[in-house]
Image (cartoon, helix red, strand yellow):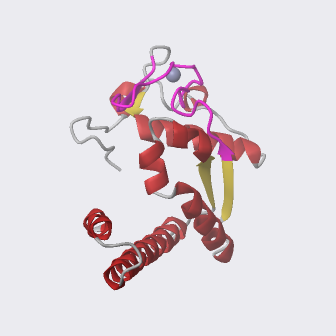
Amino acid sequence: MLKWLQRQLKDKVKGSNNYRKAQHEIRKLHEYIQNTRREFHFLTAHQLCSGNVGMIFAEDLNLVALGRGMLAKHCLDAAWGSFLDILKWVSWKRGVYFAKVDARGTSQTCPNCGTDTGKKELNERVHKCDACNYKTDRDVAAAQVVMQRGCTAVGQTVVLAVEDGCLGAPAKQQTFKSDLGKPAL
Ligand SMILES: [Zn+2]
């Protein structure tokens, strides 16, 4: 729709009535998109704060750096930065602790044993650690690392699952279905 309107605008004579009309339509659509996105962000933030949630940690991504990289469109379109601002506010409103944590290497660290498992390609959807055999969805693994960093930052002792002895054979305990592309939660 936006592309179509922009094409319409190009065909109009600059400064003409029709040009201004088309310009107005584009502005209206932009506003509509922004409002819809904002509503969605508030809704999502409230959902995240629902239940028995005590704290929320988010990756403090460098949006400018990402903006130049291959993730640019994905991240900027999703308006991650403005979502985090909204999430921060909603968390505060609802008494949930919110903090951003260092995002460096979250997708390369094994949440189970802390080993650096190296860079993953974007299409590599599974985290698999050769050191401890831990296997899970890559986004789940990254989220677990984010949570550990957050807990460390607020002064809670983080015991890696493998140290706790509860993940002796993690590969078998995971109910992760790779064919779905999403972890079974
Ligand atoms: Zn590991």
Question: 57 above or below 37?
Answer: above
**Of 8 and 79, the residue lying toward us:** 8
Residue 86 horizontal side relative to residue 135, left or right: right
Observer able to see residue 129:
yes
Residue 146 horizontal side relative to residue 121, left or right: right
Question: 184 above or below 4?
Answer: above
* Magenta stretch: helix, strand or loop mostly: loop
Question: 135 above or below 37?
Answer: above
Q: Position of residue 90 (x, y in %)?
A: 61, 72
Q: Residue at x 59, y 66 (%)?
A: 87
Q: Position of residue 126 (x, y in %)?
A: 36, 30
Q: Residue at x 66, y 77 (%)?
A: 93
Residue 160, by quadrant, is top right
**Of 169 and 46, the residue lying toward us:** 46
Residue stretch in magenta:
101-129
Q: Position of residue 180 (x, y in %)?
A: 23, 42
Residue 71, by quadrant, is top left
Q: Is residue 109 magenta?
A: yes
Q: Residue at x 39, y 31 (%)?
A: 122
**Of 43 and 81, the residue lying toward us:** 81
